[in-house]
Amino acid sequence: MAVYTEVAFDEAAALLHTLDLGDLTELRGIQGGIENTNYFVTSERNGATLEHVLTVFERLGFEQLPFYLHLMKFLAGRGIPVPDPAANARGEILHTVQGKPAAVVNKLRGRSDLAPGVAQCEAVGAMLARMHLAGRDFPLSQPNLRGLPWWNETVPVVLPFLSAPQADLIRSELAYQNHVAQSPAYKALPRGAIHADLFRDNAMFEGGELTGFFDFYFAGCDTFLFDLAVCLNDWCVLHEEGNDGTLDVPRSLALLAAYQAVRPLNAAERSLLPALLRAGALRFWISRLWDLHLPREAALLQPHDPTHFERVLRARVRDIRALSALLREDACQPA
C-alpha cells in the first residue's frame, strides 16, 4: 500500500526480534493501494530466509484492529490460506511502530493475477464460500465500516465534485440502497464475517493454484451476498480500456457455480444479488471519489480512478433484467 509512515530499518529489525523472526535483511515499501503503510520484510533465521509483510495502520485504531487480526488468525487455524499474524512471547498479535498500531504477517506465495480466466474465478468462488463457512462461528463482531451508514455520511461530502448527471446517479442509487436495506428479505440474508474488498490484487496464485486471500483490513460483519457481489464486480468484469463495466458471463457463471458447490445461495440471495451488485459498485465509487478528492499525502500514493466504478454501477442498473436471467436458479448451479 502507500507509504505514509517511514519505518527505520533498525526499528523494523527490533520488532522482528520480538517476534522471533530472525535478523532483518531487507525492508522495502510496497507501492499501490491507499489505506495503510506496508513493507515487505525479509529476514534470516537459523539459515532460513523468511518473508513477511509489515503493516502500519493509518486509518484504523488499536480498538478496531483486534477484529481484523484475530479474524485472520481464526481463518488460518481453520485451513483457509490467509496471512497469519505473528505473535510475540506474550501471544500479542497487535504491535506498535512509531506510536501507531502495526502487525507482521507471513507473505503468501505467488502473485496476483490481474487478468483472470474461468479457472481462476472458479478457484476464488470456491475459496470465498469456504471462508464464509469457516468464519460463521468467529466470536468477535464488528460492522462493515464502509457499509450503508458510511455511504450516507460520505455522499454529501463528495457531491460538490460531481457533474449533474453523476450527482443524480449517486443520489438515486443511495436512495435505492436505503430502500433495499429496509426490506424483510434483505434483513433475513445470511451474515457473518466477510472480506469486503476481495479484488484481484488481494488474492495470490502460483502455478495456477490459488494460494490465498489477503488484506482483510476492510473486513466486517455483513451479508455474505455483499462479499460475493464485490468479488463478481472485479473478477468478472472486462478491465481493458474502453470497457463499460458489463459482467463477463462465462466467468460470472463459473464463479457463482463454484461458490454454490460449497455454499448454495438461497432464493432470497439469488433474488437480491442484482441489487447487491449495484451496492458493491456504489461502495467503491464513493470510496474512490473520497480518495481522489480528499486525499492524504503519501510517499507512493496512487489513487484509483473512480469513473471505473461509475461505469460498473451504470451497467448494473442498465442490465438488471439480464442479471436476473443470469442468476436464475438453474443458471448458476454447479455442473
Image (spheres, grey):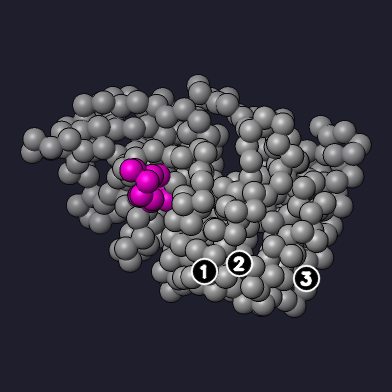
The numbered mark at residue 332 is 2
Label 3 to label 1, Cα distance in Å?
35 Å
Disc 1 residue crowd, few under 14, some 14–19, many 20+, Cα 10 Å = few
The amino acid sitting under disc 1 is Ala
Residue 183 located left or right of residue 44: right
Residue 213 shown in magenta: yes
Could you tell me the amino acid type at mark 3? Gln
Question: In the figure, residue 177 lies in which quadrant?
Answer: bottom right
Q: Is residue 335 left or right of residue 13?
A: right
Q: Which residues are magenta?
A: 204-215
Query: Most prominent secondary structure in the magenta stretch?
Result: strand
Q: Position of residue 267 (x, y in %)?
A: 67, 77
At which x and y percent is residue 140? 46, 67
Q: CA distance from mark 3 to mark 2?
A: 27 Å
Dot 3, how many residues are within 10 Å of its Cα: few (below 14), some (14-19), or many (20+)? Answer: few
Q: Which residue is mark 3?
A: 182
Disc 1: which residue? 335
Between the C-alphas of marks 1 and 2, the distance is 9 Å
- The kind of residue on which mark 2 rests is Cys
Relative to the observer, which residue lies in front, 140 or 78?
A: 78
